[in-house]
């Protein structure tokens, strides 16, 4: 059974960089697409971006200038960095495994989420 | 990139049928997936590849699509189906890169 677990600081100061890691167990990271998705308190889901096992990335245009997603296949982990954070970046951050084929995309496994608060 | 629009809230009587819709230009080119999210929990995939159910998802959940609209139908809604539901699909940016977009979400109440 594939499991994903987010880790990182729960509190980040404004203008600093948010850094999170997702550890994948029960399966290899050397396949599939690996995404970060966030959810502000009481609001809907927002796709942040994805990386594949070879390191190719795509990002949400609204966040692209501040986002970096990387992968470490040796540790079965992928990571998110969001720079110059503001209070509006406060959210529950999820990592998820993505599958793409043909005209189909979906996320079949999700982490439990980690709440990151941006505050001084 | 486009948006996916859902009705904010719908209600259904116990045992009855409810349809949740998702509208957006990306759905003319790509299939939708659907996620159920209960309070305090991570989203769970309930429909993928337009109408397929993952293992463990009851067959009262079904999906369909026509034009720019995807639908999730719950036939014989149960109390445990009360949750937020989100659609999702691929999209492309102005450079042709693959993106991903979530719908605005629908809160389903089972009465």
Image (spheres, coloured by chain):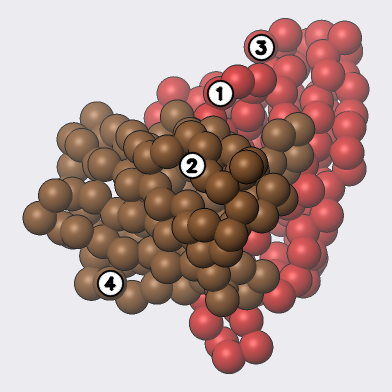
Chain colours: A brown, B red
**Mark 1 vs mark 4, CA separation in Å:** 29 Å
Residue B68 in picture, x, y percent from top left = 79, 65
Q: Are marks 3 and 1 in contact (CB under 8 Å)?
A: no
**Mark 4 vs mark 2, CA separation in Å:** 19 Å
- Residue ID for mark 3: B80
- Residue ID for mark 2: A94
- Residue ID for mark 4: A55
Q: Is residue B87 visible?
A: no
**Mark 3 vs mark 2, CA separation in Å:** 23 Å
Q: Nearer the viewer, mark 4 or mark 3?
A: 4
Give the residue drawn at x 26%, y 61%. Answer: A71
- Residue ID for mark 1: B41
**Mark 4 vs mark 3, CA separation in Å:** 39 Å
Say what secondary structure mark 2 lies in.
strand
Residue A30 in picture, x, y percent from top left = 18, 59
- A53, B71: nearer the viewer: A53
Residue B58 in picture, x, y percent from top left = 55, 22
Q: Which chain is home to disc 3?
A: B
Q: Nearer the viewer, mark 3 or mark 1?
A: 1
Up/down of A97 relative to B60, above or below: below
Classed neighbour count for the residue bearing mark 3: other residues with Cα under 10 Å, few (<14), some (14–19), many (≥20)? few
Up/down of A110 relative to B6, above or below: above
**Mark 1 vs mark 2, CA separation in Å:** 11 Å
- B55, A42: nearer the viewer: A42
Q: Nearer the viewer, mark 3 or mark 2?
A: 2
Say what secondary structure mark 4 lies in.
loop
> Tag 2 or tag 4, which sits nearer the N-term?
4
């Amino acid at each position: 059974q594939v499991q994903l677990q987010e880790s990182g600081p729960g509190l980040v100061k404004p203008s600093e960089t948010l850094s999170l890691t997702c550890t994948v167990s029960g399966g290899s990271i050397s396949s599939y697409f690996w995404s970060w998705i966030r959810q502000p308190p009481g609001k809907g889901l927002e796709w942040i971006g994805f990386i594949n096992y070879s390191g190719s990335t795509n990002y949400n245009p609204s966040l692209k200038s501040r986002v970096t997603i990387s992968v470490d296949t040796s540790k079965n982990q992928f990571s998110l960095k969001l720079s110059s954070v503001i209070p509006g970046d406060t959210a529950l951050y999820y990592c998820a495994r993505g599958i793409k084929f043909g005209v189909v995309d979906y996320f079949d496994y999700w982490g439990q989420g980690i709440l990151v608060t941006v505050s001084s | 990139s486009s948006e996916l629009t859902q009705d904010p809230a719908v209600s259904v009587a116990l045992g009855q049928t409810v349809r949740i819709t998702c509208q957006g230009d990306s759905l003319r080119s790509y299939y939708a997936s659907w996620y159920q999210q209960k309070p305090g929990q991570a989203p769970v995939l309930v429909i993928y590849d337009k109408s397929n159910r993952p293992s463990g998802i009851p067959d009262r959940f079904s999906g369909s699509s026509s034009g720019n609209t995807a639908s999730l139908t719950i036939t014989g809604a149960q109390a445990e189906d009360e949750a937020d539901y989100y659609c999702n699909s691929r999209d492309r940016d102005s450079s042709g890169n693959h993106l991903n977009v979530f719908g605005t979400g629908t809160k389903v109440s089972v009465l």
